[in-house]
Amino acid sequence: MIKHFINLEWKQYFRSSYWQKNMALNILMVFLALYFIGVFLILGFGLLPILKKVFPEEDPFVVVNGFIFFWIMIDLLMRFFLQKLPVMSVKPLLTLPVKRSSVVHYVLGKSALSFFNFLPLFAIIPFSIMLIINDYETITALTWMFAMIIVVLIINFLNFIIEAFSAETELSFLPVIALVSILYALDAFGIVSISSLLGSAFLSIADNPILLLIPLGILAFCYSFNFKILKDKLFLDSSLKSKVTEVKVADLSWTKRFGDIAPFMQLDLKLIWRNKRTKSSVFIMVIGLLYGLFFYPQPMYRDMVWLFPFIGIFVTGIFQINFGQFIPAWDSSYYKMLMSQNIKYEQYLRSKFILMVLSVGIMFVLSIPYVYFGWKILIAHFAAAIYNIGVNSHVMLFGGSFNRKKIDLNQRAAFNYQGTGAVQWIIGLPLMLLPMLIFGLTNWLAGFETGIAVLIIMGISGIVLHKKLMRIITQRYLQSKYKMIDAFSQDS
């Protein structure tokens, strides 16, 4: 049965429109995977001599075990935000004489073959080999290696348990952030030295192979717990059951002052507030507003004026970035219906533009207190806001015409990379790096005031040419209309 599942998955993957239409992206991902494999191999073989040089009076093996706690925390965070539980199309199987336990075992077994589980091995195994070469006991090095492999699998299944319990929350990333923060604080403030305790535990396991039964027991518990959770949800009725929610009606009459685009703005605002995925664009504005506090209170950053516009672009344009990069994929579930209506495409796009402009204005006003750290910061934020309105808003809309990936609005609220493609990565270059490079070069050649003036002039130029730019962007969307309809109709 497992062999049959693998055969079905293979056919589904290579026959999907995603594989056929994103060959270049797949090749890029392969190169990235090879790059990280190379980095981890270098780390695995070079870590022991590096630690001997940095900590000449300490045993490198003891030092490595002291850092295992921090590696587990970082790995858990990275997995939560990037790794997804591998799924298969189980609905058709639920009507067939296939054991649910077989399906669940296959899904969990497939998760063990994730790239996130293989990547650490390219550092763990070479490091174990280096231990043996440097006269450590072979049994000690091998026991430690197997213990680390077990821990990798524990983190894998622990991640899915955390996701299962946090999936129903509006900000699903908060539980894992809170857990990691609490554990780190306990260790950092010396309340409980978790890093030392964990390091001593792994040293004990390495010296006594019989203690491998402890991490094996934890792994078995995590696997069985995941098995129970998935099996309890694997019913056809559960996928057909409608979710009853209370709809809160907000007063959106203020949008009528925008004329013929008011209905589109109302639809966008309702979509943003009623769906988990889009609602995160609003909540993450708070994070964006506080972004400057990571830099401005630090004296070393106050002299880096070339960094101010970059921070300003991010602070004032956080909603614009999060919402704008997925236009029109937000409407992908009903895009075909929308395009069959007698509406002007320019009105549809202009409503998105106005929402982004309003968000930039609101975020700039809220960021005015940053003047406490210096008047240059306030001016840089103002120039960044004008640049966001005049340039980045149009860049966002134009980039949206290349979006071909459907978005499920009911998935978890934040740090969800479904719908993210090459477009979102490429668009970041003119969006964030270009203004920083322009300002940095102008500031170096002619001074701070000239650099600010260049950004403002570019932003004002975009505002003046808005109607002409919108006609070009609209024409681009009309040319891509049927390609987007076809792409958004695909489920994979």
Image (cartoon, rainbow, N blue to C red):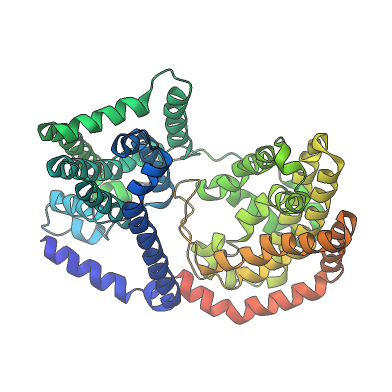
Residue 182 in the image: above or below residue 389: above
- Residue shown at 74%/45% (left/top)? 363
> 53 or 462, which lies in front?
53
Residue 51 quadrant: top left
- Residue shown at 47%/52% (left/top)? 416
In percent of width and height, residue 233 lies at: 26, 44
- On screen, residue 406 versus residue 272, left or right, reads left
- On screen, residue 93 versus residue 379, left or right, reads left
In percent of width and height, residue 271 lies at: 58, 51
In percent of width and height, residue 95 lies at: 18, 58
**Farthest bottom residue in view:** 479
Q: Looking at the rendering, in which quadrant would you find the N terminus?
A: bottom left
> 409 or 171, which lies in front?
171
> 73 or 48, which lies in front?
48
- On screen, residue 383 versus residue 155, left or right, reads right
**Farthest top residue in view:** 191
- Residue shown at 36%/62% (left/top)? 38
Residue 148 in the image: above or below residue 26: above
Residue 298 appears in the rendering: yes
In percent of width and height, residue 54 lies at: 43, 41
- On screen, residue 396 versus residue 415, left or right, reads right
Numbered marks: total: 0
Q: Looking at the rendering, in which quadrant would you find the C terminus?
A: bottom left
> 274 or 329, which lies in front?
329
Residue 344 quadrant: bottom right
Residue 348 appears in the rendering: no
- Residue shown at 55%/41% (left/top)? 247
